[in-house]
């Protein structure tokens, strides 16, 4: 399997332990992280032409991922 970029542990390398802790202790955070993970995998499949999407849909997926990443970053900062 090829490497999938933009995993949360790569996006927030300084917060790997906090990511793990919040995934187990905070149901809302766990849902956000799982949604981010699923969306990131979809984007990876689209970028590698495994899954077909229009350019508009691909851009929309990236915007959704960025919004989730921003929300996760806010939660990480508040939990640190």
Image: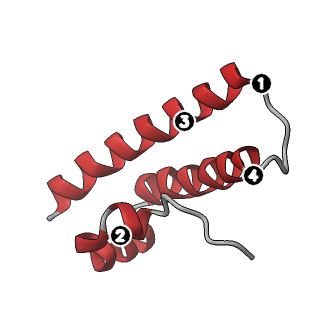
Measure how far apart labels 1 and 4 are at the Cα level: 13 Å
Measure how far apart labels 1 and 3 are at the Cα level: 13 Å
Q: Which residue is mark 3?
A: 62
**Residue shown at 44%/73% (left/top)?**
24
Q: Nearer the viewer, residue 51 or 27?
A: 51
Q: Nearer the viewer, residue 57 or 79?
A: 57
Dot 3 or dot 2: first in sequence order is 2
Dot 2 or dot 4: first in sequence order is 2
> Which one is closest to the eye, mark 3 or mark 4?
4
Q: Position of residue 39 (x, y in %)?
A: 62, 47
Measure how far apart labels 3 and 4 are at the Cα level: 14 Å
Please count the marks in the image.
Answer: 4
Q: Which residue is mark 1?
A: 54
13 lies left or right of 26: left
The secondary element bearing badge 4 is classed as: loop
> Which one is closest to the eye, mark 2 or mark 4?
4
């Amino acid at each position: 399997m090829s490497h999938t970029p933009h995993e949360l542990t790569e996006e927030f390398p300084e917060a790997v332990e906090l990511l793990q802790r919040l995934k187990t202790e905070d149901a809302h955070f766990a849902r956000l992280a799982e949604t981010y993970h699923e969306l990131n995998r979809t984007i990876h499949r689209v970028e590698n032409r495994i899954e077909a999407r229009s350019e508009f849909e691909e851009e929309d997926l990236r915007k959704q991922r960025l919004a989730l990443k921003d929300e996760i970053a806010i939660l990480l900062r508040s939990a640190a």
